[in-house]
Image: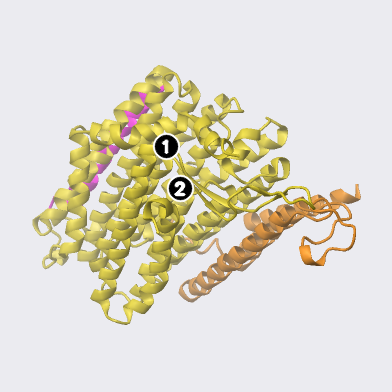
Chain colours: A yellow, B orange
Amino acid sequence: MNIATHSPALIIAIPLLGAFLTPLIGKLGRRVRDAFVLIILILTSIIGIILAQQVYSEGVVEYVFGGSSPSINSSTTSSIPIVRIIFEIDGMSIFMAMISLLLAFFAALYSISFVKDENGSDRYYTLLLLLLVGMLGMELTGDMFNFFVFIEIASISASALIAFSVDRGESLEAAIKYLAISSIGALFLLFAIGLLYGQYDALNMAMIANSLSNTYIDKIALILLIGSLAMKSGIAPMHMWMPDAYGEAPSSVTFAIIAATQASLYGLIRVCFTIYGKAFDMQAIAGVLVALAFASIFIGATMTLIQSSLTRAIAYAAVAEMGYILLGIGTALFLGVEAHGAVALKGGIFHIFNDALDMGLLFLAAGSIIYATKERNMNNLGGLARRMRFTTIFFLIGLLAASGMPPMNGFASKILIYESTYTLNPILAIIAILSSILMLAIFVRIFYSVFLGPENPNLKDIKEVPKPMLISMACISLIIILLGIFPSLVVDSIVNPAVHALSNVDAYIGSILGGV
Amino acid sequence: MIYNIPYIAVAALIMIGLYAILFKRNLIKIVIGITILESGVNLFLITLGYRKNAVAPIYTNLPEGTSIPEGMTLPVPQALTLTSIVIGVAVLALMLAISIQIYKKYRTLDVAKIRRLKG
C-alpha cells in the first residue's frame, strides 16, 4: 500500500483508531499510554507532512471514499448517481491541518504533567484525539454534509473536555453553553446544507460552487452558513461562549479548542471565498464581516480590562485576536483578492497561525500558574516571577506577541492587516492599531499583578512546573520568535499557497469537475 | 398546497424549538427545544428527498414497471437524516449528563440562577 496516495484517509484514521485504543493501552500503565498518545500524534504529523508535500508539488489533492466514478451506467437503466464523499485538500486546507496537528501535539505533551493527577485521564486523551479527528476532518473534507459531521465530532469532544473537571460547577456551566451554542449552530448549518442540496442536488463543495445561480434561497443559505460558522468561531456579538469555555477548560484543552475554533473560521473562509466567491458579489457580506471584526476587537479589548480571572482575561483577548483575523479576511473579500485584497488575505491567514501560537502560549503559561498555585484570581496572585522564572519569560513572550509588538510574530501579520485596512479606510486602520496598543497596556497590567509586585505570603512555597509543560511552552516560544524575525520562512512556504488556493477558485472546482 | 404541509411543519418545529431555547428558563426545557429544532431540520431533509408517488429506494424490492431512479425517492437525504439523528442522540445524551451534574452542583436547573460566569 502506498502511504502517499492514502494519506488523506490515514490522517483521519490513525488518530481515530488511537483515540479508541488509548483506554485499552491505559491498562498497561500511565507512561505507556502517554508514549502511545505521543507516538500516534507524531505518526499523524508525519502523514500530514507527506500530504503537505503532495499538495505543494501537485496542487489540489483529492481522495474519494466510495465509488470511483460519479455514476453507474448500465444498459437496463439510466445513469444512477452514486453517493460518495470526496476529501479535497488544497493549500488552505493543509495549512489549517498543520496548525491543528501542531497544537494537538503540544497540548498532549503539556497534558502529560498537567492531567497526571486527575481521574479518568485515559478518557481525556481519547477525547483529545477525537477533537483532533474532528478538526482535521473539517479542514480536509470537500463535502458539505461531511463538514457538518466533523463539526459535531469536534464540538461533542470539545465540550466533554471543557467539563473535564466536573467537580467545578463553572466548567459544567461553560460546557453546556458551548455544547448548546455548537449544536444550534450546527443545526442551522445543516439546514443551509439542505437548502443548497434541494436546489443543486449536490453536497460536494466544488459542485455547489460551480452550479450556484444567485437565487433568493442561495442568499438565505449564505446568511445561515455565515451566521452559524461565525457563532462557532466566537465572533462578536456571538462571542459569549468563548470567554466561558476558554476560561474554564483545563489550559491544555483550551490550547486544542483554539484550533477547533479556527477550524470553524476555516469553514467561514471556505464558504465566503470558494463556494460563494465566484457566483456572488460579496461586497455587502464583506462589509458585515469587517463590522463584526471591529465589534470583536473592541469588545475583546475592553472586556479584558475588567476581568479579575486570569484565564478569562486572556480569553477575551482571544476574542479580539479572532477579530483581527476576520478583519484581514473581510478586507480581502471587500477589495477583491486579485487587487489589494491579496495582502489582507495574506495577513489574515498568517494571523491564524500566529493567533494559535500566541494565545496558546498565554493559555499554557496561565495553566502553569493555575497548576502551581491552584489560583485563578489575579488579585490573589503576585510576585510569581521569583518562583517561576521560566513561566514568567514565556508569558512575557506570549503577551508581547499577542499585542503585536515587533520582533514577535504577531507584529509580522498585524502589519499586513493594518496596511491593507489602511487602503480600505485609514480610520479603520487607526482603530485597529489603537486596540492593539490597548491590549498591550492591559497585558502589562496583568503581567505586573501576576508576576511582579509584592509576594503573596500564601504562595511562598510554590515550585516551577514540571518539564513536559516547560518544554512545550519553550518550543512554542521558539517558533514565535523565529517567525517574528524571519516571517518569510512561513509566509513563502505555507501562507502564500493558502492565499493562492483561496484566490484560485477555478482550480478547486476544476479538480473535481474536470475529470468527470 | 398539500405538498407544502411538510414545509409548514418544518417551519413550525424550528420556531417552537427556537422559542423554547430563547425564552424557557429550565435547562431541561432548553435541551428539549434543541431536540425539537433538530427534528425540524431532519424533517426538512427527509421532505427534500420525496418524489410524488415514489417508492422506497430499495433495488431488490421494486414493484414491477418502476423506472430507476425516477420512481424512487432520493436515498441521499435519508442517509443524511440517519446520520444526523445519531449525532443528535449523542449531543442529547451529553447535554442531559451535563445537566445532571449541574443540578448536583447548583441545586437548580433555572438558567437565570446558573450564572457564576459573567462579565
Q: Which residue is mark 2?
A: A139
Q: Chain of mark 2?
A: A
Q: Position of residue A357 (x, y in %)?
A: 28, 46
How many residues crowd around disc 2 within 10 Å: few (fewer than 14), some, or many (20 or more)?
many
Q: Chain of mark 1?
A: A
Does A36 sit above or below residue A316? below
Q: Quadrant of residue B118?
A: bottom left
Residue nearest the viewer, comparing A295 with A40: A40
Q: Position of residue A268 (x, y in %)?
A: 51, 40
- Closer to viewer: mark 1 or mark 2: 1
Q: Which residue is mark 1?
A: A59
Does B101 sit above or below residue A326? below
Quadrant, the N terminus of chain A: bottom left
Q: Left or right: A394 with respect to A261?
A: left
Q: Would residue A309 be seen by someone viewing this image from the given angle? A: no
Overall secondary structure of the magenta section: helix
Quadrant, the C terminus of chain A: top right
Q: Position of residue A269 (x, y in %)?
A: 48, 38
| Residues rendered magenta in the picture | A428-454
Res. A155 mark: none
